[in-house]
Image (cartoon, rainbow, N blue to C red):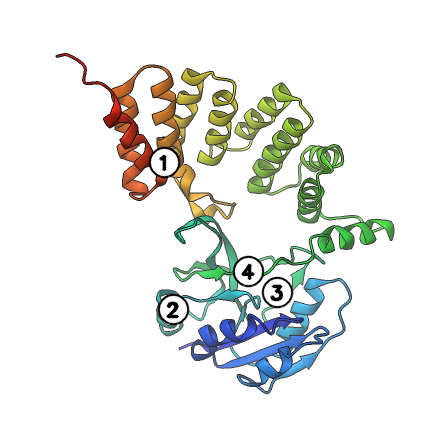
């Protein structure tokens, strides 16, 4: 059985750290906590689970802090979690099973990261992250923000997931502030950091600036395919906010130059036509979304609803607007197979039942 060091970086996490450590403590062989400047009871909480608590002055560099946490690890693999992450009970069991069976030749274990949820707790946004990393194998965190480890060697895809459960907002300006300081100091961002810099500009509603960054990122031609597709989508969002609808549509079509259609993009195209009451064309794209294979292991951002529920419920509306009531009813019931208790599904059923009975 492999051994695992849980390596964490924390700052003022007294409200969530205990929850995280309680979910993971029985799964790992040691716990490393690197505190980057807490002023609350974070250290006291951590001390209930480990005596390996280290100070590391914060210097606007997440990779540096994570590398510091890994430097104290003594087990075969390093597991990283954020303080507002947890492993649910089923994922704890899957993690323990993995520990017992993992081939020691594996260098990196990728695992799903669930970060978005609907009111019923179903996952609406997920992506794979490098979650277990072989210790002392020459891999390091890179990137002051949105840090990552580039896998080297054999990669294995695990079936345990980490669930991100935020209880409060983080500093919304922190990431952009770090990027801006790097650029002001003459640093050139690598493609991944350039991509995320564009996203931060978008989140701050600096749409023209974001467009410039995304377009340069795409023009350089050094981006990872999933980031290229996402950058095109964000170009579309920027153009929509800037009232450039045709440019937004072109940006969505540009995604097809990088790979076959993703359901997420097809749903965006469906939305573009739906909002312009072009229901026949909207239905085409929602129908195509239902044919797109879902492959989370590609590593991109995944919206599970786009692979079933969302296109079905939208096809119900499209066909209703087109006067195809039987098709509309069919897709509403198909949507129900994905989300039986959906308020939209239930509302549509009531509407269908309210219609006058057509003569035979």
Residue 308 visible in rendering: no
**Disc 1: which residue:** 344
**Disc 3: which residue:** 139
Closer to us: 334 or 63: 334
Answer left or right for 187 relative to 341. right
Choose the circle earlier in sequence order: 4 or 2: 2
Label 1: which secondary element? helix
The answer to whether 84 is drawn above or below residue 56 in the figure is above
Select label 3 or label 1 by which is in front: 1
Choose the circle earlier in sequence order: 4 or 1: 4
Residue 134: image x %, image y %? 53, 69
Choose the circle earlier in sequence order: 4 or 3: 3
Mark 4: give few (<14), some (14-19) or many (20+) Cα within 10 Å: few
Closer to us: 47 or 97: 47
Distance of label 2 from label 3 (alpha carbons): 21 Å
Choose the circle earlier in sequence order: 3 or 1: 3
Distance of label 1 from label 2 (alpha carbons): 39 Å
Please tell me which residue is depicted at 46% across the width and 59% down the height of the picture: 111
Residue 246: image x %, image y %? 62, 19
Distance of label 4 from label 2 (alpha carbons): 26 Å
Answer left or right for 228 relative to 301. right
- Whether pointer 2 and pointer 3 mark residues with C-beta atoms closer than 8 Å, the reply is no
Label 2: which secondary element? helix
Select label 4 or label 3 by which is in front: 4
Label 3: which secondary element? loop
The answer to whether 36 is drawn above or below residue 157 in the figure is below
Residue 166's label in the rendered image is: 4
Distance of label 3 from label 1 (alpha carbons): 47 Å
């Amino acid at each position: 059985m492999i051994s695992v060091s849980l390596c964490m970086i924390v700052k003022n996490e007294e409200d969530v750290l205990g929850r995280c450590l309680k979910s993971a403590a029985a799964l790992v062989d040691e716990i490393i906590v690197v505190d980057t400047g807490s002023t609350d009871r974070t250290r006291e909480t951590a001390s209930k689970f480990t005596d390996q608590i280290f100070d590391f002055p914060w210097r606007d560099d997440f990779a540096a802090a994570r590398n510091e946490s890994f430097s104290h690890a003594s087990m075969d693999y390093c597991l990283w979690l954020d303080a507002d992450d947890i492993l649910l009970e089923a994922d704890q069991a899957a993690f323990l099973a993995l520990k017992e069976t993992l081939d020691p030749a594996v260098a990196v274990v990728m695992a799903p990261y669930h970060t978005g949820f609907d009111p019923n707790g179903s996952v609406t946004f997920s992506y794979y992250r490098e979650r277990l990393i072989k210790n002392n194998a020459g891999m390091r965190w890179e990137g002051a923000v949105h840090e990552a480890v580039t896998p080297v060697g054999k990669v294995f895809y695990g079936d345990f997931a980490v669930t991100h459960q935020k209880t409060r907002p983080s500093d919304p300006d922190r990431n952009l502030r770090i990027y801006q300081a790097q650029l002001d100091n003459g640093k050139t961002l690598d493609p991944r950091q350039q991509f995320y810099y564009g996203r931060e500009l978008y989140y701050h509603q600096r749409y023209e600036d974001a467009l410039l960054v995304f377009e340069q990122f795409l023009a350089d031609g050094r981006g990872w395919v999933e980031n290229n597709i996402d950058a095109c989508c964000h170009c579309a969002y920027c153009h929509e906010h800037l009232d450039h609808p045709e440019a937004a549509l072109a940006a969505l079509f540009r995604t097809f130059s990088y790979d076959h259609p993703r359901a997420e993009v097809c749903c965006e195209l469906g939305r573009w036509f739906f909002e312009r009451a072009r229901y026949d064309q909207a239905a085409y794209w929602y129908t195509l979304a239902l044919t797109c294979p879902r492959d989370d292991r590609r590593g991109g951002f995944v919206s599970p609803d786009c692979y079933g529920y969302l296109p079905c419920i939208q096809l119900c509306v499209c066909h209703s607007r087109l006067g195809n009531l039987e098709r509309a009813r069919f897709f509403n019931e198909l949507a129900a197979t994905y989300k039986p208790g959906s308020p939209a599904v239930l509302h549509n059923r009531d509407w269908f039942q309210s219609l006058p009975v057509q003569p035979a």
